[in-house]
Image (cartoon, rainbow, N blue to C red):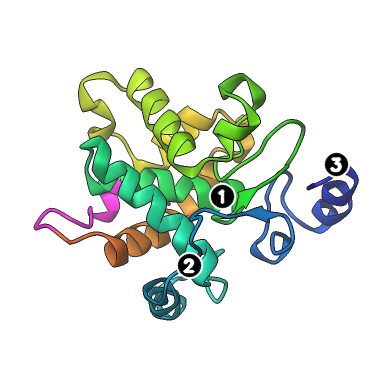
Amino acid sequence: MFTAAYLALSLVLLPPTEIRPDQVEHVSLPCVQTGASADDADTAGALNQQLATKMRGYMNPYNTSCARVIVETVQRSGLNDRAAAIAIATVIVESSIANLDGGLGDSVGLFQQRASWGSFEQRTDPVWATGRFLAVMRQFYPNDSWNNVAIGEVAAVVQRPAAKYRHRYGVEVGDAVKIVNELWTQNGKWPPSSEESGGR
C-alpha cells in the first residue's frame, strides 16, 4: 500500500499531495487484465518524445494502457476528446496515470477518489472510476457546459483540491491533449487553442 509514512517522507521534497511517476512502480494495480499491448509500448515511446511536463520520459506500456482505458471509456460514454483530456489531465496530477492501491488518506485508484466515491473495488476499476469522474463532471457542468470552461478548471472543480493546488491541473493540459491525440482519432476542432484549454 502507498502508506502515509512513505508519502510523508517522499513529499518533503515535492509539492504536497503530488504523486510523482517514479513513486508508483510497486504500488500499481493493473488497468487492463490482459496487460499492456505492443501498441501501448509504441505509443509510450512516441509520447516520451512529445511530453513536456511531469510525465516526460516516464510513459511506459503500463501507464499508456491506463490512459487508453480512460480514453476508451470516454468514447463509450458518448463524450468528446475534450472530456478525455480533462480526465487525463486529472490522472496525471493525481496518480501519474497509475492505478494506485493507496494514497493520501483513503484515496485510491487513477483519480485518487476518496471512499465517499465508492468501494475500493470500484475506485480501482479504471472503467468505473472514469465513469464516476465523468458523471460528477456532468453534475457540476450540466448540458455539456464543461465544453466552454478551461480544461484545468473543470478538473479542479471535480477534484476539489485546496485552492493553492488548483493550478496543477492546468499545468498538465498540454500533455493531456498530446496523450489524447495519440489515442483518439483527431477531428477538425481538436486540439483546443491555448485560450480554450485555459491550461496555464
**Vertical order, 37 against 140 (above or below):** below
Magenta includes 193? Answer: yes
Q: Give the class, few, some or many, for how many residues have Cα within 10 Å of label 2's Cα (few <14, many ≥20).
A: some
Q: What element carries label 1?
A: helix
Query: Circle 2 — which element?
Result: loop
- At label 2, which amino acid type do we have? Ala
119 on left or right of 200: right
Question: What segment carries the magenta color?
Answer: 187-198
Which three-letter amino acid code belongs to the residue tagged 1? Val
In the rendering, at what x and y percent does residue 151 appear? Answer: 36, 42
Q: Is the magenta stretch mostly helix, strand or loop?
A: loop
Residue at 45 percent of width and 61 percent of height: 65
The residue indicated by pointer 1 is: 93
Reading the image, the residue beneath label 3 is 4
Residue at the front extreme? Answer: 34
Of the image marks 1 and 2, the number of the one nearer the N terminus: 2
Please indicate whether residue 78 sits to the left or right of residue 134 in the image. left
Label 1 packing within 10 angstroms: few (<14), some (14-19), many (20+): many
Count of numbered circles on the image: 3
Q: Mark 2 points at which residue?
A: 36
Foreground mark, 3 or 2? 2
